Image (cartoon, helix red, strand yellow):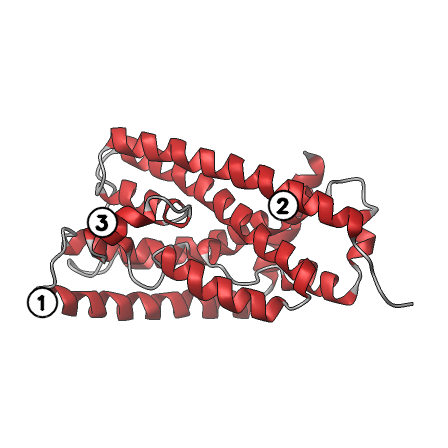
Amino acid sequence: MKTYSTIFKIKLQEQLHYKGSYISGVLCQIGFGFMHILLYLAFFENGVPQDFSVSQMVTYVWLTQAFFAMFHYGDSCKKHISNEIVSGNVCYQLIKPINLYNLWLAEVWFTGISMALVRCIPLLLFASILPGGYGLVLPVSILAFVLFLLSLILGSLLIAVIKMFAYILVLYTLDPRGVFNITYSLFGFLAGLVIPIPLFPSNIQRAFDFLPFRYVGDLPYKIYIGYISLPTALWQIAIQIVWIVSLFVIGKLILNQKSKELVVQGG
Protein backbone atom coordinates (compact mmCIF):
# COMPACT_ATOMS: atom_id res chain seq x y z
CA MET A 1 0.00 0.00 0.00
CA LYS A 2 2.91 2.34 0.67
CA THR A 3 3.93 2.08 -2.98
CA TYR A 4 0.48 3.08 -4.20
CA SER A 5 0.15 5.95 -1.72
CA THR A 6 3.52 7.26 -2.90
CA ILE A 7 2.37 7.14 -6.52
CA PHE A 8 -0.78 9.08 -5.60
CA LYS A 9 1.20 11.75 -3.75
CA ILE A 10 3.53 12.17 -6.73
CA LYS A 11 0.59 12.54 -9.13
CA LEU A 12 -1.10 15.10 -6.91
CA GLN A 13 2.12 17.11 -6.53
CA GLU A 14 2.56 17.09 -10.31
CA GLN A 15 -0.87 18.64 -10.78
CA LEU A 16 -0.34 21.29 -8.09
CA HIS A 17 3.07 22.15 -9.52
CA TYR A 18 1.78 23.21 -12.93
CA LYS A 19 -0.40 26.15 -11.88
CA GLY A 20 -0.80 27.48 -15.41
CA SER A 21 -2.21 24.19 -16.61
CA TYR A 22 -4.47 24.03 -13.55
CA ILE A 23 -5.95 27.51 -14.09
CA SER A 24 -6.37 27.09 -17.83
CA GLY A 25 -8.03 23.71 -17.25
CA VAL A 26 -10.62 25.19 -14.89
CA LEU A 27 -11.37 28.10 -17.25
CA CYS A 28 -11.63 25.74 -20.19
CA GLN A 29 -14.15 23.50 -18.42
CA ILE A 30 -16.22 26.52 -17.37
CA GLY A 31 -16.32 27.69 -20.98
CA PHE A 32 -17.33 24.28 -22.26
CA GLY A 33 -19.95 24.06 -19.52
CA PHE A 34 -21.69 27.23 -20.70
CA MET A 35 -21.44 26.11 -24.33
CA HIS A 36 -23.08 22.76 -23.61
CA ILE A 37 -25.80 24.31 -21.43
CA LEU A 38 -26.74 26.84 -24.14
CA LEU A 39 -26.74 24.10 -26.76
CA TYR A 40 -29.01 21.80 -24.75
CA LEU A 41 -31.32 24.68 -23.80
CA ALA A 42 -31.78 25.28 -27.52
CA PHE A 43 -32.82 21.63 -27.89
CA PHE A 44 -35.30 22.02 -25.05
CA GLU A 45 -36.81 25.20 -26.47
CA ASN A 46 -37.31 23.56 -29.86
CA GLY A 47 -39.36 20.75 -28.37
CA VAL A 48 -36.86 17.92 -28.60
CA PRO A 49 -38.50 14.97 -26.71
CA GLN A 50 -36.72 14.27 -23.40
CA ASP A 51 -37.48 13.43 -19.79
CA PHE A 52 -34.63 15.51 -18.40
CA SER A 53 -35.62 18.71 -16.55
CA VAL A 54 -33.64 21.88 -17.18
CA SER A 55 -32.15 21.91 -13.68
CA GLN A 56 -31.17 18.25 -13.99
CA MET A 57 -29.56 18.89 -17.37
CA VAL A 58 -27.61 21.92 -16.11
CA THR A 59 -26.35 20.06 -13.03
CA TYR A 60 -25.44 17.05 -15.15
CA VAL A 61 -23.35 19.31 -17.42
CA TRP A 62 -21.51 20.96 -14.54
CA LEU A 63 -20.72 17.61 -12.95
CA THR A 64 -19.45 16.36 -16.30
CA GLN A 65 -17.15 19.36 -16.62
CA ALA A 66 -16.01 19.23 -12.98
CA PHE A 67 -14.84 15.63 -13.28
CA PHE A 68 -13.91 15.69 -16.97
CA ALA A 69 -10.21 15.19 -16.20
CA MET A 70 -11.09 12.00 -14.35
CA PHE A 71 -13.40 10.62 -17.00
CA HIS A 72 -11.81 11.48 -20.34
CA TYR A 73 -10.37 8.76 -22.55
CA GLY A 74 -7.20 10.53 -23.66
CA ASP A 75 -3.60 9.49 -23.06
CA SER A 76 -3.32 10.91 -19.55
CA CYS A 77 -0.14 8.93 -18.82
CA LYS A 78 1.71 9.66 -22.03
CA LYS A 79 4.97 10.42 -20.27
CA HIS A 80 4.97 7.46 -17.91
CA ILE A 81 3.43 4.71 -20.06
CA SER A 82 3.10 5.49 -23.78
CA ASN A 83 6.54 7.05 -24.16
CA GLU A 84 8.09 4.25 -22.09
CA ILE A 85 6.57 1.67 -24.44
CA VAL A 86 7.62 3.41 -27.66
CA SER A 87 11.14 4.17 -26.39
CA GLY A 88 11.66 0.65 -25.03
CA ASN A 89 12.18 1.87 -21.47
CA VAL A 90 9.26 -0.31 -20.46
CA CYS A 91 11.88 -3.02 -19.90
CA TYR A 92 12.99 -1.18 -16.74
CA GLN A 93 9.43 -1.31 -15.41
CA LEU A 94 9.41 -5.08 -15.85
CA ILE A 95 12.17 -5.49 -13.26
CA LYS A 96 10.40 -3.44 -10.59
CA PRO A 97 9.05 -5.41 -7.59
CA ILE A 98 5.46 -4.71 -8.60
CA ASN A 99 3.26 -6.29 -11.23
CA LEU A 100 3.32 -4.27 -14.46
CA TYR A 101 -0.47 -4.19 -14.76
CA ASN A 102 -0.88 -2.99 -11.17
CA LEU A 103 1.76 -0.31 -11.70
CA TRP A 104 0.16 1.03 -14.86
CA LEU A 105 -3.34 0.88 -13.40
CA ALA A 106 -2.19 2.91 -10.37
CA GLU A 107 -0.56 5.45 -12.70
CA VAL A 108 -3.74 5.84 -14.78
CA TRP A 109 -6.17 5.83 -11.85
CA PHE A 110 -4.26 8.25 -9.63
CA THR A 111 -3.50 10.60 -12.51
CA GLY A 112 -7.20 10.94 -13.25
CA ILE A 113 -8.14 11.43 -9.61
CA SER A 114 -5.42 14.01 -8.96
CA MET A 115 -6.32 15.99 -12.09
CA ALA A 116 -9.98 16.05 -11.07
CA LEU A 117 -9.29 16.94 -7.42
CA VAL A 118 -7.44 20.16 -8.22
CA ARG A 119 -10.02 21.25 -10.81
CA CYS A 120 -13.41 20.19 -9.49
CA ILE A 121 -13.56 22.28 -6.30
CA PRO A 122 -13.25 25.77 -7.88
CA LEU A 123 -15.51 24.77 -10.77
CA LEU A 124 -18.24 23.37 -8.51
CA LEU A 125 -18.06 26.46 -6.27
CA PHE A 126 -18.40 28.69 -9.32
CA ALA A 127 -21.31 26.67 -10.72
CA SER A 128 -23.13 26.70 -7.36
CA ILE A 129 -23.32 30.52 -7.22
CA LEU A 130 -24.72 30.97 -10.72
CA PRO A 131 -28.32 32.19 -11.02
CA GLY A 132 -31.21 29.77 -11.40
CA GLY A 133 -31.33 27.89 -14.67
CA TYR A 134 -27.56 28.00 -15.08
CA GLY A 135 -26.23 26.83 -11.73
CA LEU A 136 -25.48 23.59 -9.95
CA VAL A 137 -28.23 22.35 -7.62
CA LEU A 138 -27.84 20.29 -4.45
CA PRO A 139 -28.25 16.49 -4.60
CA VAL A 140 -31.78 15.19 -4.15
CA SER A 141 -30.96 13.59 -0.78
CA ILE A 142 -28.09 12.79 1.57
CA LEU A 143 -28.28 9.09 0.66
CA ALA A 144 -28.20 9.98 -3.02
CA PHE A 145 -25.06 12.05 -2.38
CA VAL A 146 -23.38 9.13 -0.56
CA LEU A 147 -24.21 6.77 -3.42
CA PHE A 148 -23.01 9.42 -5.87
CA LEU A 149 -19.61 9.54 -4.16
CA LEU A 150 -19.39 5.73 -4.11
CA SER A 151 -20.32 5.45 -7.77
CA LEU A 152 -17.94 8.30 -8.64
CA ILE A 153 -14.98 6.48 -7.06
CA LEU A 154 -15.95 3.21 -8.72
CA GLY A 155 -16.39 5.03 -12.02
CA SER A 156 -12.89 6.49 -11.79
CA LEU A 157 -11.53 2.97 -11.31
CA LEU A 158 -13.68 1.59 -14.13
CA ILE A 159 -12.39 4.11 -16.66
CA ALA A 160 -8.82 3.36 -15.55
CA VAL A 161 -9.44 -0.35 -16.18
CA ILE A 162 -10.96 0.45 -19.60
CA LYS A 163 -8.03 2.69 -20.55
CA MET A 164 -5.63 -0.10 -19.65
CA PHE A 165 -6.81 -1.94 -22.78
CA ALA A 166 -5.69 1.07 -24.85
CA TYR A 167 -2.22 0.97 -23.29
CA ILE A 168 -2.06 -2.79 -23.85
CA LEU A 169 -2.95 -2.16 -27.50
CA VAL A 170 -0.10 0.37 -27.69
CA LEU A 171 2.23 -2.49 -26.75
CA TYR A 172 1.13 -4.27 -29.93
CA THR A 173 0.96 -1.28 -32.29
CA LEU A 174 3.59 1.14 -30.86
CA ASP A 175 1.25 3.91 -32.03
CA PRO A 176 -0.26 5.68 -29.00
CA ARG A 177 -1.57 8.61 -31.04
CA GLY A 178 -3.61 6.39 -33.34
CA VAL A 179 -4.90 4.20 -30.52
CA PHE A 180 -6.01 7.07 -28.31
CA ASN A 181 -7.51 9.09 -31.18
CA ILE A 182 -9.85 6.16 -31.78
CA THR A 183 -10.59 5.38 -28.12
CA TYR A 184 -11.08 9.05 -27.20
CA SER A 185 -13.65 9.60 -29.96
CA LEU A 186 -15.51 6.29 -29.72
CA PHE A 187 -15.47 5.69 -25.98
CA GLY A 188 -16.16 9.34 -25.20
CA PHE A 189 -19.27 9.26 -27.37
CA LEU A 190 -20.51 6.01 -25.81
CA ALA A 191 -19.87 7.43 -22.32
CA GLY A 192 -22.02 10.51 -22.95
CA LEU A 193 -19.20 13.05 -23.04
CA VAL A 194 -20.40 14.43 -26.40
CA ILE A 195 -24.16 14.19 -25.82
CA PRO A 196 -25.52 13.30 -22.36
CA ILE A 197 -26.92 9.79 -22.48
CA PRO A 198 -30.36 10.87 -21.10
CA LEU A 199 -30.81 13.02 -24.24
CA PHE A 200 -30.48 9.99 -26.54
CA PRO A 201 -33.62 8.15 -27.72
CA SER A 202 -34.78 5.54 -25.20
CA ASN A 203 -33.88 2.58 -27.45
CA ILE A 204 -30.30 3.80 -27.77
CA GLN A 205 -30.11 4.35 -24.02
CA ARG A 206 -31.16 0.75 -23.47
CA ALA A 207 -28.38 -0.40 -25.82
CA PHE A 208 -25.87 1.58 -23.73
CA ASP A 209 -26.92 -0.47 -20.70
CA PHE A 210 -25.02 -3.43 -22.14
CA LEU A 211 -21.74 -1.48 -22.40
CA PRO A 212 -19.43 -0.46 -19.54
CA PHE A 213 -19.01 3.17 -20.62
CA ARG A 214 -22.26 4.58 -19.22
CA TYR A 215 -21.31 3.21 -15.80
CA VAL A 216 -18.24 5.45 -15.73
CA GLY A 217 -19.54 9.00 -15.35
CA ASP A 218 -23.17 8.90 -16.44
CA LEU A 219 -24.29 6.71 -13.52
CA PRO A 220 -22.98 8.86 -10.63
CA TYR A 221 -24.36 12.02 -12.23
CA LYS A 222 -27.80 10.46 -12.63
CA ILE A 223 -27.74 9.40 -8.98
CA TYR A 224 -26.85 12.95 -7.90
CA ILE A 225 -29.70 14.61 -9.80
CA GLY A 226 -32.26 11.97 -8.86
CA TYR A 227 -32.79 10.79 -12.41
CA ILE A 228 -32.85 7.18 -11.16
CA SER A 229 -34.29 5.75 -7.94
CA LEU A 230 -32.04 4.69 -5.08
CA PRO A 231 -32.85 0.94 -5.46
CA THR A 232 -31.96 1.22 -9.16
CA ALA A 233 -28.79 3.07 -8.21
CA LEU A 234 -27.73 0.26 -5.88
CA TRP A 235 -28.38 -2.33 -8.59
CA GLN A 236 -26.39 -0.37 -11.18
CA ILE A 237 -23.52 0.18 -8.73
CA ALA A 238 -23.39 -3.60 -8.43
CA ILE A 239 -23.14 -3.77 -12.23
CA GLN A 240 -20.32 -1.22 -12.01
CA ILE A 241 -18.40 -3.53 -9.69
CA VAL A 242 -18.97 -6.51 -11.98
CA TRP A 243 -17.56 -4.57 -14.94
CA ILE A 244 -14.52 -3.49 -12.91
CA VAL A 245 -13.70 -7.01 -11.75
CA SER A 246 -14.32 -8.57 -15.16
CA LEU A 247 -12.25 -6.07 -17.16
CA PHE A 248 -9.51 -6.06 -14.51
CA VAL A 249 -9.09 -9.84 -14.71
CA ILE A 250 -9.16 -9.92 -18.53
CA GLY A 251 -6.77 -6.99 -18.91
CA LYS A 252 -4.32 -8.34 -16.35
CA LEU A 253 -4.24 -11.76 -18.03
CA ILE A 254 -3.57 -10.21 -21.43
CA LEU A 255 -0.82 -7.88 -20.18
CA ASN A 256 0.86 -10.58 -18.10
CA GLN A 257 0.97 -12.84 -21.15
CA LYS A 258 2.20 -10.05 -23.42
CA SER A 259 4.94 -9.02 -20.97
CA LYS A 260 6.38 -12.54 -21.15
CA GLU A 261 6.66 -12.21 -24.94
CA LEU A 262 7.87 -8.59 -24.95
CA VAL A 263 10.93 -7.90 -27.10
CA VAL A 264 12.73 -4.56 -26.78
CA GLN A 265 14.86 -3.57 -29.76
CA GLY A 266 17.82 -1.22 -29.55
CA GLY A 267 21.18 -1.07 -27.88
Q: Residue at x 79, y 63 (%)?
A: 88
- 200 left or right, relative to 155: left
Tell me the element at label 1.
Answer: helix
The residue wearing badge 2 is 106
Helix, strand or loop for disc 3: loop
Q: Are marks 3 and 2 in contact (CB under 8 Å)?
A: no
Q: Secondary structure at mark 2?
A: helix
Measure how far apart labels 3 and 2 are at the Cα level: 33 Å
Q: Crowdedness of circle 1 by 10 Å Cα count: few (<14), some, many (20+)?
A: few
Pair 1/3: label in front: 1
Residue drawn where x is 33% and y is 30% of the image: 235
Name which residue type carries label 2.
Ala
Residue holding disc 3: 137
Which mark is first along the chain, 3 or 1? 1
Quadrant showing the N terminus: top right
**CA gap, disc 2 and disc 1:** 44 Å
Q: CA distance from mark 1 to mark 3?
A: 21 Å
Left/right placement of residue 183 relative to residue 208 reads right
